[in-house]
Amino acid sequence: DTEVTQTPKHLVMGMTNKKSLKCEQHMGHRAMYWYKQKAKKPPELMFVYSYEKLSINESVPSRFSPECPNSSLLNLHLHALQPEDSALYLCASSQDIGDSQHFGDGTRLSIL
Amino acid sequence: GEDVEQSLFLSVREGDSSVINCTYTDSSSTYLYWYKQEPGAGLQLLTYIFSNMDMKQDQRLTVLLNKKDKHLSLRIADTQTGDSAIYFCAEIEEAAGNKLTFGGGTRVLVKP
């Protein structure tokens, strides 16, 4: 069982839709991360939040918009995505930046 | 080229030992990690080793670190069919803001 919970598990959306991915942890971790993983590849870092502030943006297109409403929650807002954005989106958290990261089970996103 | 490299595939018979190898380049790495990813799931943190250690054992798992050669290995004793998965080694890159850098992953297939 993972201590990082992601919803939904699966999401199919059209290119004009707006949707959000959610991530929650109750371990008291102060760093949270979004990763994108394509099939048969390692995860690629997208964003890092530290103490609820955006710390790293790995030059991610603006159609992906992260939000950290509080220390337990991390959202990823999606708008006008492209078919190549279809992937597994993983959330992770760690006590602080540089500490062991714990991953959720991901949201499998398909763009039609 | 990649900062962290792994072989692509390992086939092993049930009950035998598996050894997964990894090389890395960042000599300032403080922690090195092994993650397991089963089909359709997120990444599970298996174990990690601090850079001033050369060995760590945790039940069926043994991690060996050769810091001089920047070589990391994960040995799984008495490999079971449930060990079939992709295994990622990863390092924390201090020079890159403590980002977690993954190897390409080794797919382990356990045959009965």
Image (cartoon, coloured by chain):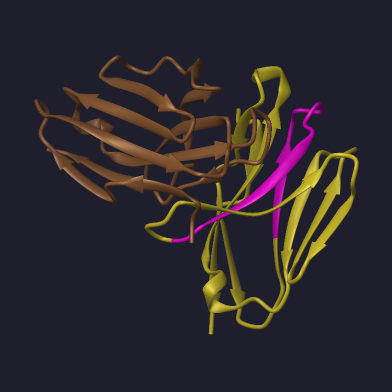
Q: Is residue B40 above or below residue A37?
A: below
The brown-tinted chain is A
Give the image location of residue A59, x and y in percent.
Answer: 42, 14
Front residue (pair B70, A98): A98
Find residue B52 and report its horizontal and vertical position in percent. 90, 40
Q: How many marks?
A: 0
Please check the rendered image and state whether residue B3 is part of the magenta-colored stretch, yes or no.
Answer: no
| Vertical position of residue A83 compared to residue B85: above or below | above
* B22 falls in the magenta region: yes
Which of these two is toward me, B53 or B20?
B53
State the image quarter where residue B94 is shown. Answer: top right
Magenta stretch, main secondary structure, is strand
Is A90 left or right of A10, judged from the image as shown?
Answer: right
Q: Can you give x and y, in whole percent of width and height, for residue A66 in the image?
A: 36, 23
Q: Nearer the viewer, residue A76 or B81?
A: A76
Identify which residue is drawn at 68% across, 30% down.
A98
Q: Colour in which chain B is shown?
A: yellow
What residue is rendered at 56% in x and 22% in y? A50
Q: Magenta residues, as a range?
A: B20-38
Q: Answer with left or right where residue A63 lies relative to residue B6.
A: left
